[in-house]
Image (spheres, coloured by chain):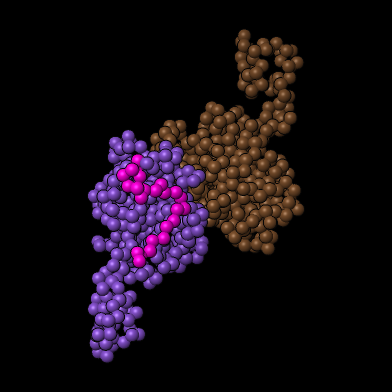
Chain colours: A brown, B purple
Amino acid sequence: MVTITLLGTASLLPLPDRAETAAFLSCNGRGILLDCGEGTQTAARKADVNLMRTDLIALTHYHGDHVFGLPGLLQSMSVLGRTEPITITGPAGLNQELQPLLRLTGKTTYEIRVMRMPEGGLPLKQLHSNWPDGATLAAFGTNHRVSSQGYCFTLDRAGKFQPDKAKALGIPVQLWSRLQRGETVAVDGKTYRPEEVLGPARKGIRFVFSGDTSPCSSLIQASMGADLLICEGTYGDPEQTETALERGHMTFSQAAEIAAAAGVKELWLAHYSQMMQDPVAYLPYAASIFPGAVCGVDGMSKTLTFPD
Amino acid sequence: MVTITLLGTASLLPLPDRAETAAFLSCNGRGILLDCGEGTQTAARKADVNLMRTDLIALTHYHGDHVFGLPGLLQSMSVLGRTEPITITGPAGLNQELQPLLRLTGKTTYEIRVMRMPEGGLPLKQLHSNWPDGATLAAFGTNHRVSSQGYCFTLDRAGKFQPDKAKALGIPVQLWSRLQRGETVAVDGKTYRPEEVLGPARKGIRFVFSGDTSPCSSLIQASMGADLLICEGTYGDPEQTETALERGHMTFSQAAEIAAAAGVKELWLAHYSQMMQDPVAYLPYAASIFPGAVCGVDGMSKTLTFPD
C-alpha cells in the first residue's frame, strides 16, 4: 500500500490555500518527500503527514518555490530529535545548489547524505529496511529552463504463489511465505528460488511526479500505465501554450495529452500560476482530452493498492 | 496613524495556525517588516497585509525561525515587479548572515540595501517620502544566545499650533500649515521656526518589538510608556523560568514584569514554544502581573493613534 499526499499546489507565489510545491509518498511507515517549497512543514501538519518518516527528499530542480522549505524542515527534524540519516537527491548541480541551503540549515542531529540517483533507480530498501522489496524510485530528465528531473516510483509485484509447484519440489510449508516474499531459501542442503514457485510477475504500482517541465517524451515514457501522475499544469488556458513553452511549463491540455498518451489511470494537475484563481474553471480543457484529470488541491491524498 | 499586524507567533516549529515570527508596521501606505520567518508571505495574505509596501525589513537575529521566509519574499517581490529599493537591517553579523539568504534569492528587479541601524535611530523619511516627519525606528541590544536586537518605533507629535503667537509674529495664514507640520518657512526676508508658534511637544506613538530575548533592562528602557509592546513569551509556565534563561528566552510572567516596569499600555505575547498548545491557558500568569497582557494570535492587528 502506497499513499500519495499532495502538499502544495502553488507555483511562484504561495497563497493561503496553496503552499509551494511538495508531495509525500508513504509506504510501510516510511516516506519520500518530493520537492520542499516554503510552507511544506505546515502543509504536512494540516494533511496529517509525519515528515519525520522521510528517508529521501527528491528535488525536481532548484528554483525557490521547490526548495525554500528545506532549511526549516531540516532544522525542525533536529528540534524533534531525529537521529536517522536522511538522503537528498536532485538533478545536476546538486552539491552546489544545496550548499547555501545546508549552510542556512547548520548542524543537524542526524546525517544528511547527498547523492545523485543511480541509473535504473534506487532500491528504497537501501535507505530503510521497512521499504518493501521491489520498491524503487527512479529519476528521468525533464524539460524546464534549468537542470530538472521528474521521479517515477514503482513497487513491483511478484507472481502468484503456486502451492502445487512447491509441493512437487518438496519445499516445507513453513518456508513458503519467505519464497512468496521473494526470498531465496535453503533447506537440507537444497536452495529454492522464488521464480520456481511463483507465476509470472503481476502488475505493480507506479506513481509519477513531473516537477516543472514542458511536455517531453521522457515524462510520457515514465508515466506509461501509471496509477497516478501528478503533473504540473501551470497554465489553464490553451491560449497560454506559447508562454508555457517559453517558461518551461505546460497547460492543462498538454498535461492531459501526456496522461492520455501514457494511459495513466488518474492525473492530478498542480503547480498553478498565481494568476489562475480557480483552476477548476479550466479543468474541462484537460478532462475533454483525458477524463481521469482532476485539479489537485493541497492535502489531497490517495492510497494506491495492487489490483485484485 | 500606525497599524501593527502580528503575522506569526510560532517559535521553532511552524504550525497550521502559527506561522514563524513576523510582524508588520504600516503608516501612510508604507511599512516595516519585523522579522521574516517561513510562511510570512502566506500569513500576510491571510491578514490582508501588502508586503510590497515594505521599505525596511528589520531582523532581530538570524535564527531560522526569524529569517527563512526572506528568500521567498524577496523573490516574490521580483515576480510582482517591484522596482523600489528595499533596506534590510539586523544586528552584528548582518552582511555575513545575509550572504546565503541573498545567494538563494538571486537577482532581483529592485535594489537590496543592507545597513546597520544608526545610533539614535533611522528617520524613516530617508527610506520613502510618505513616512511622516518624526517617524523613527531605533534598535536596542537584547539578550539572546546570539547577536540580537529589538526595535522601537516612535512617531513624534509636535506641540499644538498657537494662532495667537502666529498672528502676533505677523505670519501669513497660508504658511501656518507648513509650520504646523514642522517646517521652517521664510517670507519677506524673515524666517519662522515651528517652535515659535507651537506649544510643547505632545505625546506621540511608541511601539516596541522585542525579538527573542531574556529579560533585560534595555527592553524595559525602550518600552517606557509604549502604546504597544510585542514581547516574546516562549514559555507559559513560571516553572520554566530556568529553561527560558538558559535558552535566551522568557516566560509569560517575565514579559508581564517588563510591561509593568515600563508602564506600557498593552502587551501582546508571542513566539510560543511548540509545546504550548494553548497559550491562553497560561495568560493568568501574565495578567496577574500586568492586566493589559494579551495572547497574540496570527493576524491580530491594532491601529495606534495620537491621544486626543
Q: Quadrant of the C terminus of chain B?
A: bottom left
Image: A60 above or below B163: above
The residue depicted at 61 percent of the width and 14 percent of the height is A186
Q: Which residues are magenta?
A: B285-308
Q: Position of residue A221 (x, y in %)?
A: 67, 45
Q: Position of residue A77 (x, y in %)?
A: 44, 38
Choose between B52 and A114: the one closer to the eye. B52
Q: Quadrant of residue B120?
A: bottom left
Q: Residue furthest bottom?
A: B188
Q: Is residue B292 magenta?
A: yes
Q: Quadrant of the N terminus of chain B?
A: bottom left
Q: Is residue B23 magenta?
A: no
The answer to whether residue A169 is visible is yes
Choose between B42 and A11: the one closer to the eye. B42
Choose between A92 and B211: the one closer to the eye. B211
Query: In the picture provided, is A146 more to the left or to the right than B40?
Result: right
Choose between B221 and A276: the one closer to the eye. B221
Image: B55 above or below A170: below
Q: Residue furthest top?
A: A188
Image: B183 above or below B3: below
The residue depicted at 39 percent of the width and 53 percent of the height is B35
Q: Position of residue A23 (x, y in %)?
A: 57, 43
Query: In the picture provided, is A308 more to the left or to the right than B251?
Result: right
Image: A172 above or below A79: above
The number of callouts visible is: 0
The residue depicted at 47 percent of the width and 40 percent of the height is A114
Q: Position of residue B297 (x, y in %)?
A: 44, 49
